[in-house]
Amino acid sequence: AFHRLEMVHQDLKPENVLVDPHGTVTLIDFGATRVAGLEDSEIGEQAVPRGAALYSAPETFLGEPGSWLSDQFSLGVITYQLLTGQLPYGAEVPKIHSRNQLRGLNYRPARHLRENLPAWVDDTIEKAVHPQAHRRYPALSEYLYKLRHPSVDWHKRHRPPLMERNPVAFWQGVSALLLLALLAALGLG
């Protein structure tokens, strides 16, 4: 609803997200919020990142104004941090000053830090915190939905290896290959 009203928070960080005992989420600290039609008249005001640097989207460090995609990035970073205790790009995002540096950002998979995290959750977060804004989810609601529901497409694209799906078949195949290699070695010997 916030973004549909053409407002961008621009300072999403854990301290600005309150959750009550019933699970209701409340955002606070709207001091950096940008409202469409009420842009600051100061020259260069939009070229300065407004939120907490570690949660701000990379494009804001390149002088671009924050957008709802920047807020999505911040929410993705918060989600990642809640699950792992770390940041997806470490402290590298605030150091971005060029497109080349932006392309050099490397996402640290959350499942490497928390092995019990489903891969589809990590993939969902990775897309939300993509360094290039146009590669993030087209709607914040899609990100939130995918955090709770693995898509059918994901299961088709990420089929587990044979060793995980059917360990007996895997080892039978390995044994057959070893037998063929042994027979070939004996026949050539």
Image (spheres, helix red, strand yellow):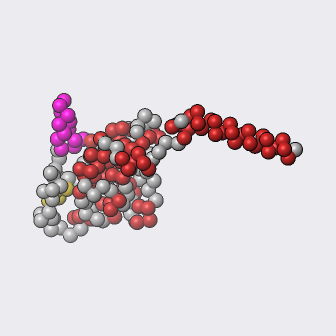
View extreme (bottom): residue: 43
Instruction: Tell whether 161 sits left or right of 30.
Output: right
Q: Where does the image place residue 166, in percent across and percent down from the top left?
A: 54, 36
In this orientation, which residue lies closer to the viewer: 107 or 111?
Answer: 111
Q: Where does the image place residue 155, in percent across and percent down from the top left?
A: 41, 45
Q: Which residues are magenta?
A: 15-27
Q: Where does the image place residue 4, in percent across and percent down from the top left?
A: 15, 56
View extreme (top): residue: 21
Q: Residue at x 69, y 39 (%)?
A: 176
In this orientation, which residue lies closer to the viewer: 77 or 178?
Answer: 178
Quick one: quadrant of the C terminus?
top right
Camera sees residue 102: yes
Instruction: Tell whether 179 sits left or right of 125.
Output: right
Q: Residue at x 17, y 37 (%)?
A: 24
Q: Quadrant of residue 65?
A: bottom left
Q: Where does the image place residue 26, in percent across and percent down from the top left?
A: 17, 41
View extreme (right): residue: 189
Instruction: Tell whether 153 sits left or right of 31.
Output: right
